[in-house]
Image (tube, grey):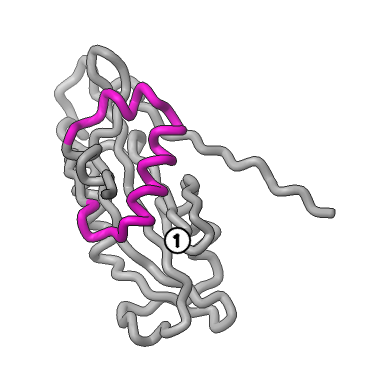
Amino acid sequence: MTEKKKKNIGFNIIKNDPTDGHKGFGVGALSLENVSPVFIDIEEGEAFVDIGAMHARSQVERGIKFTHVKEDVPNGKPYWLVWVTVDRKEEGPYYAGVAACELTVDREARRGYKSLPEHVNRMDKSLKRHIIVDHMDDRSKKILANFLKNHDEKMWELSSEELKKGLSVQ
């Protein structure tokens, strides 16, 4: 009998500013310490954090040769990779930027589809506090909203109305 591993669903919370106290090199640079990659497995109906995605080394991506042509992977299993940026206001941390991009993976054929420029641009948009979720399907929006709420209800409450509205499903 195999036991299901307990999943670590931790988000990176902002650390102290490494450039505090000096105006030298690195001032104005974006820090990746406060962004987390959240995968949504649409078929399984679950979401999980996999920090390996920061370098395209997540469990989903490992061992797969990716193409930028969606039609090359007709039997691919659909996923969303959502870049979630956490920021802090006086009341506490909140989800500041959320940007989703799609990918598909065919484990049997060891092939997958993803647009690397889109993934990089969406991570950048998330870091810049943008909310880009309108292109997601309703089921995935619901999975993501539940995941973010269950991770930390207070962070969800402190998040923007744009995010809550973007992930709401009729």
Magenta highlight range: 133-161
User: Which corner quadrant holds the N terminus?
Assistant: bottom right
Q: Residue 117 appears in which quarter of the rendering?
A: bottom left
Picture coordinates of residue 75, whole percent (x, y): 47, 82
Q: Which residue sits at x=42%, y=27%?
A: 152
Picture coordinates of residue 112, whole percent (x, y): 44, 75
Of residue 17 and residue 78, the one placed in the foreground of this image is 78
Magenta stretch: dominant secondary structure: helix
Q: How many marks?
A: 1
**Is 146 one of the magenta-colored residues?**
yes
Residue furthest to the front in view is 170
**Is 14 one of the magenta-colored residues?**
no
Q: Amino acid at mark 1?
A: Ile
**133 w.r.t. 11: above or below:** below
Q: Which residue sits at x=36%, y=42%?
A: 145
Identify the residue position indicated by label 1 in the image.
42
Please tell me whether mark 1 sits on a helix, a strand or a loop: loop
Picture coordinates of residue 19, whole percent (x, y): 24, 24
Q: Which residue sits at x=21%, y=34%?
A: 26
Picture coordinates of residue 90, whole percent (x, y): 23, 13
Of residue 3 and residue 83, the one placed in the foreground of this image is 3
Is residue 120 rendered to the left or right of residue 40?
Answer: left
**138 w.r.t. 167: above or below:** below
Of residue 149 and residue 5, the one placed in the foreground of this image is 149
**66 w.r.t. 50: above or below:** below
Disc 1: CA contacts within 10 A as few (<14), some (14-19) or many (>=20): some
Q: Which residue sits at x=18%, y=33%?
A: 161
